[in-house]
Image (cartoon, rainbow, N blue to C red):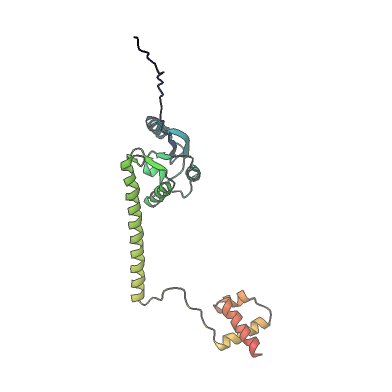
Amino acid sequence: MRGNSERFPIERIWVVCMEKQKVAAIYVRCSTSEQDTQVQETELKEFAEKRRWVINNVYKDKGVSGAKENRPALDELLADARRRKMDVVLVWKFDRFARSLKQLIGALEFFRRLRIDFVSYTEGIDTSIPSGELVFHIFGAMAQFERALISERVKAGLAQARRAGTRLGRPPIRRLTEPEAYLIRADWGSKECSIRGLAARYGTTEWMIRKAISVGETSA
């Protein structure tokens, strides 16, 4: 007796788990209009391609000194970062991006809060890899150390000033003598000078002038 056999269809289901591509922003800068940013752009684009990152924009500050407080392309990059338009920022070198260590630390802290990675190509700094996370902690520790140093210097300076007999804080309000108060009331009565003008004339505050006038009016 021939046994019955049942054949079940075999379906092969291929599940492809694709990792979301990171969006990269490239920032380049050169100090003079005669210089070119093409070399920086080319190598940073190649780096992003090897990492399979999508480039959303190249921000260029051409002929802009790194010492300038405001740089149009950098300002635009930071504004786009707040809108989360990128996952990682690529720069050629630290000094192309930040004018000082303080600005660099501030920018790294800014990116860390937004969960945006930072790559400095020539220095080999890459916070997108596990070991790169250490960079955030190192620069954070440097920032804290700098703040502590500044605080200690301020405290030491204040202590030295006190030892030298220097009076700290705002200078005390100069009190008016009775003759001065009388003259102030007389000047005010003549309607030739304002409260501010009287304060400037007698080297005191507007509050003290009003007080002298009100005392005179009360006495009268």
In which quarter of the view is residue 188 placed?
bottom right
Q: Nearer the viewer, residue 110 or 43?
A: 110
In the picture, the quarter occupied by the N terminus is top left
Q: Nearer the viewer, residue 200 or 215?
A: 215
Percent across and percent down for residue 111 are 42, 46
Q: Is residue 40 above or below residue 159?
A: above
In the picture, the quarter occupied by the C terminus is bottom right
Q: Is residue 146 above or below residue 209?
A: above
In which quarter of the view is residue 190 placed?
bottom right
Toward the front, the furthest residue is 1
Q: Is residue 180 above or below residue 171?
A: below
Number of numbered tags placed on the structure image: 0
Percent across and percent down for residue 161 are 36, 73
Q: Is residue 186 among the parts visible in the rendering?
A: yes
Q: Is residue 104 left or right of residue 83?
A: left
Toward the bottom, the furthest residue is 219
Q: Is residue 201 among the parts visible in the rendering?
A: no
Percent across and percent down for residue 145 are 32, 57
Write the residue at 58% across / 76% down: 206
Q: Is residue 33 above or below residue 200?
A: above
Percent across and percent down for residue 83 are 51, 44
Q: Nearer the viewer, residue 29 or 182?
A: 29
Write the residue at 42% across / 40% down: 89
